[in-house]
């Protein structure tokens, strides 16, 4: 190792050591090193930074400062960012580089970011976006955990890498959220939202890491025509690069096996591997297909399944009274995490799988995220369905809807219903009141502070009691009340969705609001016939809506909370030529949009419609894995419905998020 690289390594050690000491002192009240030792290490760091010109983003010698932006500007990439073709076959992976050396590395599952340095200073960071146009996130990149703000190289350097959040940080952040529905679903979505924050203080708190995976430009530097040399050079500049190995056709299977074992304990999320030709010029000479560059290929693992024993079915009550079955089984390792539970959705699924205690079952993670039961190998059968609610102990009833059996609690005052009812009202897609978790709601309901929706806006009456409640305090209370007051101005669809009307989800609430031009009185006075004239509102939604407001208690509760709120009149967006009048289905993981709700909202605003299943009425299926063997892909192919990627959708529609 060169002297320069040794100095960079020492800088990283000092930054980590000093930051750990500061955290212990200021956050935990512990002194792990003396002031004298701290000052000595600080002076050593300062001296090394000045002599090398290398400064880490989290160095204690600098203060990047936080900044709040009104929006993220867009910028076109210097060269388009194409996606790689994919395979699940190790043999195909080996034959891809026959006769050549390759470089195999992790395909990290985060958000791709392009960094630009000039004169040794980070000057720009842009997300992948749709591959041609991304969002400028320079302020956020400056607070990534592990990137250098200053480097030795003085020319223009452009690199691509993946911004990721560790599983350990993901778990830490989720532990702070008591509301199960509000927890982040996976590290990728958390990272995407963190990287694209308008306030980079939030980004800094999320511990985003950056791993370089491609060098795009560094003029005047000889890399000996080798990607491996590029990685070595980037490490010499202080960047962390993806774990990688030089391979040939014979050694690829062994390395795939290594990565397959490593992913089980890897702290960074990964959804596969990437294989590139090490010979840079040869890779470039191969050119591109219509969709993919020919210099590399991505490898995706087959869905990992594991056999286990079903211990019992747990029945979990919801705000609607629906009691959902959850399979609890002996722990198994899947995709690097321990899994013990999987939702079974309803009684019919339990019966079809013939689930019984002690059965041998196989489980997997759908999209490597959501645990599901694949098969029941013994099928002893569902022996008993609870006759009393597990929460309130009152009577239950089995109801059949469209040929599917569901279990319901009949008690209108079931605590599970009340807690989940008011938590939904305060949730992100409804009134968006920060801090109103299920745990908090349970305390307020038990204390008698909340008996109806409007009581949420009168919690300041219990200021003294709440401030002195365990888990609260003056600052928490003030933040809580500020969030409540902020929610007083809201959109009509949020209120309708927040009521939790059976069968009226977020999409239905938006459709109803739009149809009545955000006129609440007009909507309340509409009869069933008028409601069913609305595109997207069928008999089920119409009946549910009318039935809800027939109940005098519901109507009074609604009118009371309406007195506390001001409805914002939304400006209608113009229809989009490609989207307007079309029906879309979205499936699989997303790269550009944070989640399906976000994509759905944009499509609906531009005159389109999003449904959950592929039918003859579907115009497009959006799936980033076009060659997936999923049921939706198969159905779309059977019906001749085009399957497009997010990138295709954005290019065809011209949408800029």
Image (cartoon, grey):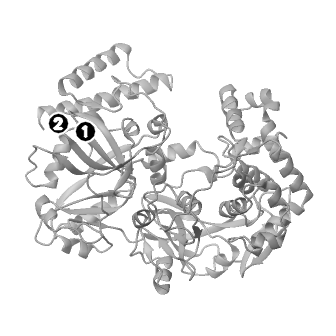
* Image side of residue 207 versus residue 326, left or right: left
> What residue sits 57% from the left and 75% below the top?
613
Q: Quadrant of the N terminus?
A: top left
The answer to whether any part of residue 394 appears in the image is yes
The label on residue 117 is: 1
* Image side of residue 424 versus residue 101, left or right: right
Comparing labels 1 and 2, the label whose residue is closer to the camera: 1
Tell me if residue 603 comes above or below residue 50 in the rendering. Answer: below
> What residue sits 38% from the left and 20% below the top?
33
Q: Which residue is mark 2?
A: 153
Percent position of residue 98, x then y: 14, 72
Percent position of residue 529, x then y: 82, 73
Percent position of residue 411, x then y: 86, 61
Camera-side residue of 87 and 127 = 127
* Image side of residue 94 versus residue 441, left or right: left
* Image side of residue 328 versus residue 451, left or right: left
Tell me if residue 126 comes above or below residue 619 in the rendering. Answer: above
């Amino acid at each position: 190792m060169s002297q320069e690289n040794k100095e960079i390594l020492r800088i990283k050690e000092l930054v980590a050591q000093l930051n750990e000491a500061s955290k212990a002192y200021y956050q935990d009240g512990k002194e792990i090193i003396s002031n004298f030792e701290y000052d000595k290490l600080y002076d050593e760091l300062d001296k090394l930074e000045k002599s090398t010109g290398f400064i880490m983003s989290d160095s204690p010698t600098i203060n990047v400062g936080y900044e709040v932006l009104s929006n993220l500007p867009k910028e076109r990439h210097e060269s388009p960012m194409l996606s790689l073709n994919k395979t699940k076959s190790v043999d195909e992976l080996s034959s891809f580089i026959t006769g050549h050396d390759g470089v195999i590395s992790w395909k990290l599952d985060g958000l791709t970011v392009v960094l630009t340095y000039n004169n040794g200073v980070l000057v720009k960071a842009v997300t992948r976006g749709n591959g041609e146009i991304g969002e400028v996130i320079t302020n956020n990149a400056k607070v990534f955990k592990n990137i250098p703000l200053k480097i030795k190289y003085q020319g223009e350097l452009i690199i691509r890498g993946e911004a990721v959040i560790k599983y350990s940080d993901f778990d830490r952040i989720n532990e702070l959220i008591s509301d199960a529905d509000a927890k982040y679903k996976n590290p990728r979505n958390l990272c995407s939202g963190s990287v694209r924050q308008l306030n980079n203080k939030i980004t800094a708190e999320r511990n985003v890491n950056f791993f370089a995976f491609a060098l795009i430009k560094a003029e005047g530097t000889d890399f000996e025509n080798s990607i491996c040399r590029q990685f070595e050079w980037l490490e010499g500049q202080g960047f962390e690069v993806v774990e990688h190995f030089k391979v040939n056709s014979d050694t690829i299977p062994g390395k795939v096996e290594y990565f397959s074992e490593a992913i089980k304990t890897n702290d960074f999320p990964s959804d596969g591997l990437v294989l590139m030709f090490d010979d840079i010029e040869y890779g470039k000479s191969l050119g591109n297909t219509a969709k993919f560059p020919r210099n590399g290929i991505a490898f995706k693992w087959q869905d990992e399944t594991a056999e286990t024993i079903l211990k019992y079915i747990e029945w979990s009550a919801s705000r609607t009274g629906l009691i959902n079955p959850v399979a609890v089984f002996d722990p198994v390792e899947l995709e690097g995490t321990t899994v013990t539970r999987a939702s079974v959705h309803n009684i019919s699924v339990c019966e079809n799988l013939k689930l019984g205690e002690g059965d041998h079952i196989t489980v997997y993670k759908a999209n490597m995220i959501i645990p599901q039961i694949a098969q029941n190998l013994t099928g002893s059968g569902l022996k008993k369905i609870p006759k009393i609610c597990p929460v309130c102990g009152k009577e239950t009833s089995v109801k059949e809807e469209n040929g599917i059996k569901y279990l319901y609690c009949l008690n209108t005052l079931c605590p599970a219903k009340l807690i989940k009812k008011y938590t939904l009202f305060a949730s992100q897609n409804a009134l968006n009141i920060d801090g109103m978790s299920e745990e908090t709601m349970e305390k307020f309901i038990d204390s008698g502070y909340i008996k109806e929706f409007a009581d949420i806006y009168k919690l300041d009456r219990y200021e003294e009691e709440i401030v002195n409640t365990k888990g609260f305090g003056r600052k928490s209370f003030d933040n809580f009340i500020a969030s409540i007051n902020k929610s007083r101005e809201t959109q009509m669809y949020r209120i309708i969705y927040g009521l939790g009307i059976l069968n009226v989800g977020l999409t239905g609430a938006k459709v109803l609001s739009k149809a009545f031009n955000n006129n609440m009185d007009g909507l309340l006075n509409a009869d069933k016939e008028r409601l069913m004239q609305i595109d997207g509102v069928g008999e089920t939604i119409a009946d549910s809506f009318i039935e809800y407001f027939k109940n005098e208690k519901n109507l009074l509760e609604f009118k009371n909370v309406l007195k506390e709120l001001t409805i914002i009149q939304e400006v209608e967006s113009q229809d989009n030529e490609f989207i307007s009048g079309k029906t879309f289905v979205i499936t699989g993981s997303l790269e550009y949009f944070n989640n399906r709700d976000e994509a759905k909202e944009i499509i609906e605003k531009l005159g389109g419609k999003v449904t959950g299943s592929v039918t003859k009425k579907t115009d497009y299926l959006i799936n980033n894995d076009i060659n997936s063997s999923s049921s939706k892909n198969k159905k779309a192919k059977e019906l001749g419905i085009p399957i497009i990627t997010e990138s295709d959708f954005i290019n065809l529609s011209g949408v800029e998020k």
